């Protein structure tokens, strides 16, 4: 019998040994998103689960950082206008401007709770097209140079996972309907040419 997303999430918590207090924190945030918009909630869980697979594929020693960042990357949409958040057609420039607020909103919601993830999600939309946000808030934590590099590295991966899942699961106007897997690969490569080798590896190894 196929597992529900919630069951898969609980299995992931067990697999990578997420502590009880952290499970509570993560699920509290997710459940708040669920009340605001179920598709966003489901998208976030799928991205978190995929983050573990990508972390293993890239031999990241501890997958927790990528898992947390993927699981929480759209937390800022809790503060988005529901009229824009729930729109599946007729999505205009004003809606886009509203949605562009979510990385900074997410950062402000998560800092002091999940600081490393909060910093990562600020950058997850910076690398495709006219990336956003234009202004990155100054960090309240003095991250080391190594951590700063990892933040950008993880953010780029989160951006790819986010893009892939939205494309393959959300029925909206952006991609003209849900593409086939190979059509999805072409779209990913078109919009993320700087990551062509990595994207092809993820597809060739059945991760995407």
Image: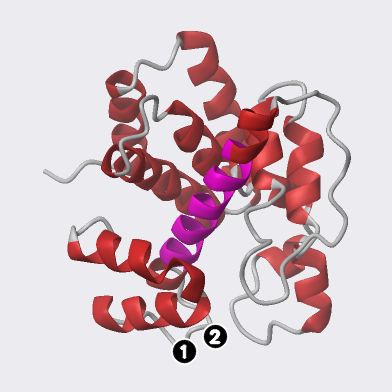
Secondary element at tag 2 = loop
Residue 103: x and y, percent?
A: 73, 51
Q: Is residue 161 magenta?
A: yes
- Residue located 55% across and 38% down the image: 69
Tell me residue 161's x, y (percent): 45, 56
Residue 181: x and y in percent read 26, 75
What is the number of the mark on residue 95? none
Q: Within 10 Å of the Cα at label 1, are there few (<14), some (14-19), or many (20+) other Cα atoms?
A: few
Label 1 residue SS: loop
Question: Which residue in the protein does label 1 denote?
Answer: 176
Q: In which quarter of the image is the C terminus?
A: bottom left
**Is residue 38 visible in the rendered structure shown here?**
no
Q: How crowded is mark 2: few (under 14 residues within 10 Å), some or many (20 or more)?
A: few
**Residue 129 vertical placement versus 150 (above, below):** below
Determine whether 93 is above or below 45 in the image.
below
Residue 42, x across and y down, in percent: 46, 50
**How far apart are the two marked residues, 2 and 1, measured between alpha carbons?**
5 Å
Residue located 66% across and 25% down the image: 114
Q: Residue 173 carries which label?
A: 2
Q: State yes or no: discs 2 and 1 in contact (Cβ < 8 Å).
A: yes
Mark yes or no: residue 34 visible.
yes
Picture quadrant of residue 52: top left
Looking at this rendering, what residue extends furthest in the left direction? 1
185 vs 43, nearest the viewer: 185
In the picture, measured across the screen, residue 100 lies left or right of residue 41, that is right
At 57% from the left and 35% from the top, the residue drawn is: 31
What's drawn in magenta, residue-wise? 150-166
Q: Which residue is at 54% across, 46% downward?
A: 153
């Amino acid at each position: 019998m196929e597992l529900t997303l919630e069951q898969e999430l609980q299995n992931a918590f067990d697999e990578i040994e997420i502590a009880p207090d952290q499970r509570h924190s993560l699920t509290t945030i997710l459940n708040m998103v669920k009340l605001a918009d179920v598709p966003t909630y489901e998208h976030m869980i799928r991205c978190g689960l995929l983050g573990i697979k990508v972390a293993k594929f890239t031999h990241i020693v501890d997958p927790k950082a990528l898992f947390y960042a993927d699981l929480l990357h759209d937390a800022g949409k809790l503060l988005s206008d529901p009229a824009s958040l729930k729109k599946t057609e007729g999505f205009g420039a004003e809606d886009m401007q509203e949605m562009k607020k979510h990385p900074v909103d997410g950062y402000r919601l998560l800092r002091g709770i999940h600081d490393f993830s909060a910093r990562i999600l600020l950058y997850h939309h910076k690398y495709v097209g006219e990336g956003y946000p234009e202004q990155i808030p100054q960090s309240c934590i003095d991250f080391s140079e190594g951590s700063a590099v990892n933040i950008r590295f993880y953010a780029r991966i989160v951006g790819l996972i986010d893009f892939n899942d939205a494309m393959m699961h959300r029925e909206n106007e952006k991609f003209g309907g849900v593409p086939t897997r190979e059509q999805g690969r072409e779209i990913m490569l078109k919009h993320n040419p700087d990551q062509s080798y990595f994207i092809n590896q993820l597809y060739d190894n059945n991760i995407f």
